[in-house]
Image (cartoon, helix red, strand yellow):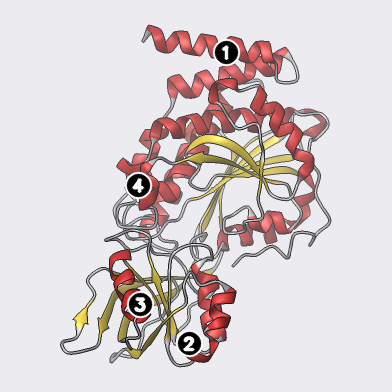
Amino acid sequence: MKSHARTICLLTGTLIAAGCHSPRGGQLAGRLIAEVMTGSQLSNNLRALAVPGGRLSGSPNAAKAEQYVLDKLLEYGLSNVHFEAFRMTTWRDRSTEITVLGDPPQRLDVVQALGNSLSTPPEGITGELVDVGKGTREEFEARKELLAGRFALAHYGDVHRARKMKYALQHGALGLFHISHIEDQVVVGTCHDTPDPAPGVAICLKDGEKLSRRLAVGETIRVNVKIDADAWEASPRNVVGEIPGRGSHADEIVVLCAHLDSWHLAEGAIDNGSGSAAILEAARALVTVGPPPRRTIRFVWFMGEEHGLHGSEAYVEAHQEELDRIVAVINLDMPGEPRTFVTYGHPEAVEFLRAVRDALPGYELSRNVRTSTGAFSDHAPFMRAGVCALAIGGDCGPGVKHYHTAEDKYEAVDRRGLNGCAAVLSVLARRLADADPAPTHRLASGVLAGQDGW
């Protein structure tokens, strides 16, 4: 206990010496870190959110999670706490069956329909397999003469599964078999923008490599796919709360966000109970440690991310009139123990982020701010609207291999490392909220619209 207190004192002293633009900033940073280190409720909140069956958008579990976060925001004393509902088509499967035809036929044991794949006819859909490697555009193009009326078999990596499905359908394929990266588990995820009858299925690495080897020696493999799934209209709710700013910059906004929804195979703890719990802890710390920030700090938990960023898309559409006033959006999606800051298309933010990094030497963040054009999380709608989007890149530990699988559970999360992320996030948010002038600016609308996304 004495060692823990000594660590806090030393870290606080270092921060004050380094300064966050001013001694006041350094003192605030130290107090924020101390608040997270000594009073964190992150683990308890994560445990409450990570329940069997996950938080599939539009499901009863999701509604309970939405209410839990809202109640916590009220308990912590945030302002303007409310839901923002939106409409979307949600999806879940009831059963998936894959049979490799032959004498005798072989039923694969570890299979999973990919998101937005609708039910097949009762007799299933039958076709041959064609191996398309990692599923790049070039690999699909090289096999275009073989794909019509067959299933594409794609290995994990390089290209998002939704992009692989688009390439497959562009070449007349029946659908997509996606090989997971884990020996005996499948990785779920969306493979269509909207519900579609073309089957997308995930198979485990062991089965996928066996099929690939057979194809490599010239065998013809026929498979039958049966999916029983449901798609329905739902009204999930984004959850919003604020710490109001004060003074002349109060109408400007720093947004901290994470997606609250998850897939349904397990508990959705890593993806993205971790990010949801981290920004909830940041909200608690930031509202506890005063005085109020210059700019408003807004917290948003998005639903519908796993099905195609529906919640964040709806939010950006509904808040068009205030986009010019958003200084930055910090999105946490599976953040882990903090390792680096990330910016999406805003080089003017790099020096500011380096200064924050220099004020936090105890976390050993990389001096190099990582730049990215990735568009597969809730920062993307803001990025395409020209708003500065940031993230904290981290190390999720060995449990990260279980994300989107049946083992994505509370125990797989590195909670100590995640508390470090909540502390760093709190300091970064407060620095952005107090900076004068604002360290970033909105780019012309559409400048980043060409980035690859759903």
Camera-side residue: 249 or 2?
2
Badge 2: few (under 14), some or many (20 or more) residues near its Cα, within 10 Å? many
Q: Which amino acid does label 4 sit on?
A: Ala
Residue 95, given in percent of the width and then of the height, sits at: 28, 75
Q: Which amino acid does label 2 sit on?
A: Ala
In the visual, does 278 lie left or right of 293? left
Do we see residue 97 in this rendering? yes
Do we see residue 293 in this rendering? no
Q: Which residue is at a point 33% across and 69% down the rendered structure image?
A: 209
Answer yes or no: do the residues labelled 3 and 1 have beta carbons within 8 Å? no
Which of the two labelled residues, at mark 3 and mark 4, occupies the earlier sequence position?
4
Q: Which residue is at a point 45% across and 55% down the rendered structure image?
A: 261
Camera-side residue: 255 or 330?
330
Answer yes or no: do the residues labelled 1 and 2 have beta carbons within 8 Å? no
Circle 3 residue:
229
| 259 versus 161 height, above or below | above
Q: Which residue is at a point 20% across and 81% down the rendered structure image?
A: 106
Quadrant where the image shows the C terminus: bottom right
Label disc, if present, on residue 173 of the rendered structure = 2
Residue 153, given in percent of the width and then of the height, sits at: 41, 77
- Quarter-wise, where is residue 406 in the image? bottom left
- Quarter-wise, where is residue 320 in the image? bottom right
Marks 3 and 1, how far apart in space?
54 Å
Circle 4 residue:
50
Q: What residue type is labelled 1?
A: Thr
Q: Which dot, 1 or 4, sits closer to the camera?
A: 1
Look at the numbered disc 2 and give the secondary structure of its residue.
loop
Circle 1 residue:
12
In the visual, does 367 lie left or right of 33? right
Badge 4: few (under 14), some or many (20 or more) residues near its Cα, within 10 Å? many
